[in-house]
Image: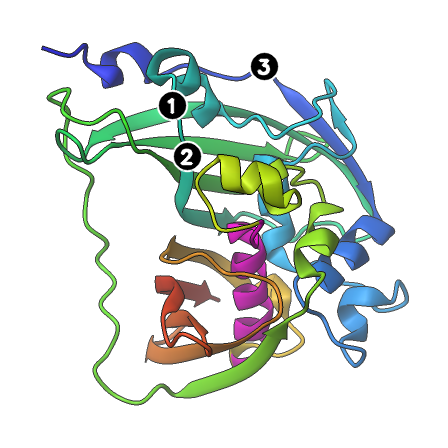
Amino acid sequence: MKKNLADMLVGKKMEPRYMEYNWRDIALYALAVGAKREDLIYTYEKYLKAIPTYGTVPYWGTVNVKPYQWMPLPASMLADEIIKPTISFLNMDHEIIMHRPIDPIKGTFQYQDVITDVYDRGEGKGAVVKTKVLVRDEAGNDVCTNYSTTFFHEAGGFGGQPMPKSPVVIRDRAPDFEIDDYISPVQNLLYRLTGDTNLVHVDPDYAKKMGFETSFMQGLCSFGFSCRMAIGALIPGEPERMTRMAAQMSSVLFPDTPVSLQIWKIGEGVAYFRFMNKTTGKPILNRGVFEWK
């Protein structure tokens, strides 16, 4: 019988890390997730507010991070030492909970990521590693908490617990909002400048070696696109009101693609969403939830 990966991995931590940023990083992030020329609250320091999903940047971030690392190294990558995958892992879903607005002018994120769960999808179906990253500011105040799951193709069948199913059920009716947008031919390169320097998003040859058609978009770029677009539809001009956002990553997205965000209002301060590829008709992000106060 295979060794129980949960027993081997849960509780493993990365070393504490620090990420310094200033208003230019906040504005660059906004542009990387599709901010438009009229979105001056995200790009002009006179009015500047941070898109809340900037708080996801530490998860895969390498830019302005100490200790220095040249490639993203979240806690889920500690599983590499045990699973030893021969093909690429995949980011399966992400959740961010906001505790306070991000200072848009400058700051230092302090964070440490830890493996919280390992789920078994069955023999030949892979395993899922869940991690938590609590981000604090330089004063020690909680800014946001990230939860993310990473899928490893080759590690299932160890007798672990199955992955819980999402409670989000997209409504069988027309969305309340549907907003069109566009992923530019260089969107992956622009988002890479925010800190996700994983080679599969920039080097076509490396991406093919890892089992993909070519280099493709970062999942958290789609997450940031969806956040910006949902704010525009639900709480325009008030990103500080967002309290939580989560979504499953359902399909690979390539640059130079038209997209749309479909939103269903569920109740006071709660909406479900899908981020759609308009070329294929497939969801890029699915079972999304956006909450605000």
What percent of the width, then of the height, locates residue 198? 61, 37
Q: Earlier in the sequence, mark 3 or mark 1?
A: 3
Residue 223 is one of the magenta-drawn residues: yes
Q: Write the start and end of the magenta stretch as one range.
A: 215-233
Mark 1 crowdedness (10 Å alpha carbons): few <14, some 14-19, many ≥20: some
Element type where label 2 sits in the image: loop
**Residue designated by label 1:** 85
What percent of the width, then of the height, locates residue 52? 61, 56
Q: Using the rendered image of the protein, determine whether residue 262 is visible from the camera's viewpoint.
A: yes
Q: Residue at x 35, y 63 (%)?
A: 286
Q: Check disc 3 and give the amino acid type.
A: Glu
Res. 21 image quadrant: top right
Q: Check disc 1 and give the amino acid type.
A: Pro
**Residue designated by label 3:** 15
What percent of the width, then of the height, locates residue 208? 51, 41
Res. 33 image quadrant: bottom right
Q: CA distance from mark 3 to mark 2?
A: 22 Å
Closer to the camera: disc 3 or disc 1?
Answer: 1
